[in-house]
Image (spheres, grey):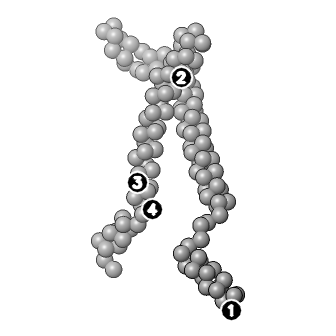
């Protein structure tokens, strides 16, 4: 089997397409969560903290060196813990949303498994034949 035919077989499997769709939707969902955290949640938290933005929270080890023209000669060396906190919040929101989706899917699967399946046409026909044979 050639490389091209193996690749075609791989691509034509439903799981690959499902995975691709999941990655694209996941990327878009990540952008929504990032915007929610950056544009809605963090300004509120920053306002409660006295107007500071989480991204601005840092501990400077060595300040930046700037020349007379205002050009940075040596950038600052800082421990940027605010950006890390913001990334953790992004992750927690995404993880919670995924948890809710998985929980809803599991609930739907459980309800489908508990629901009695309707008899097929073959089962109905076999039941009728059985009933006829009982009367004879």
Labels 1, 2: front one: 1
Dot 3 or dot 2, earlier in sequence: 3
Task: Please give the name of the residue rendered at 51% of the width and 17% of the height, measured from the top-left corner.
Answer: 43
Task: Please give the name of the residue rendered at 40% of the width and 46% of the height, measured from the top-left corner.
Answer: 24
Badge number at residue 15: 4
Q: Residues within 10 Å of mark 2 (few under 14, many from 20)?
A: some
Identify the element where label 2 is drawn. Answer: helix
Distance CA(mark 3)–CA(mark 2): 30 Å
Badge number at residue 136: 1
Badge number at residue 20: 3
The image quadrant that residue 58 belongs to is: top right
Label 2 near label 3: C-beta < 8 Å? no
Above-or-below relation of 97 to 53:
below
Dot 3 or dot 4, earlier in sequence: 4
The single residue placed furthest to the front in the displayed view is 135
Above-or-below relation of 75 to 126:
above
Task: Please give the name of the residue rendered at 59% of the width and 77% of the height, measured from the top-left corner.
Answer: 123
Distance CA(mark 1)–CA(mark 2): 77 Å
Query: Left or right: 48 with respect to 20?
Result: right
Badge number at residue 41: 2
Quadrant, the N terminus:
bottom left
The image quadrant that residue 136 belongs to is: bottom right
Above-or-below relation of 3 to 80:
below
Label 1 near label 3: C-beta < 8 Å? no
Provide residue 104's location: percent of width, then percent of height. 60, 47
Distance CA(mark 4)–CA(mark 2): 36 Å
Dot 1 or dot 2, earlier in sequence: 2
Q: Is residue 101 visible?
A: yes
Query: Left or right: 102 with respect to 14?
Result: right
Q: Residues within 10 Å of mark 4 (few under 14, many from 20)?
A: few
Q: Residues within 10 Å of mark 3 (few under 14, many from 20)?
A: few
Labels 3, 1: front one: 1
């Amino acid at each position: 089997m050639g490389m091209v035919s193996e690749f075609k077989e791989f691509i034509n499997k439903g799981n690959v397409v499902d995975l691709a769709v999941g990655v694209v939707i996941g990327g878009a969902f990540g952008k929504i969560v990032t915007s929610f955290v950056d544009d809605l949640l963090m300004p509120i938290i920053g306002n409660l903290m006295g107007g500071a933005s989480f991204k601005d929270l840092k501990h400077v080890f060595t300040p930046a060196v700037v020349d007379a023209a205002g050009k940075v000669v040596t950038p600052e060396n800082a421990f940027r813990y605010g950006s890390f906190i913001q990334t953790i919040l992004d992750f927690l929101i995404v993880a919670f949303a995924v948890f809710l989706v998985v929980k809803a899917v599991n609930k739907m699967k459980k309800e489908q498994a508990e629901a009695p399946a309707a008899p097929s046409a073959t089962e109905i026909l076999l039941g009728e034949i059985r009933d006829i044979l009982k009367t004879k």
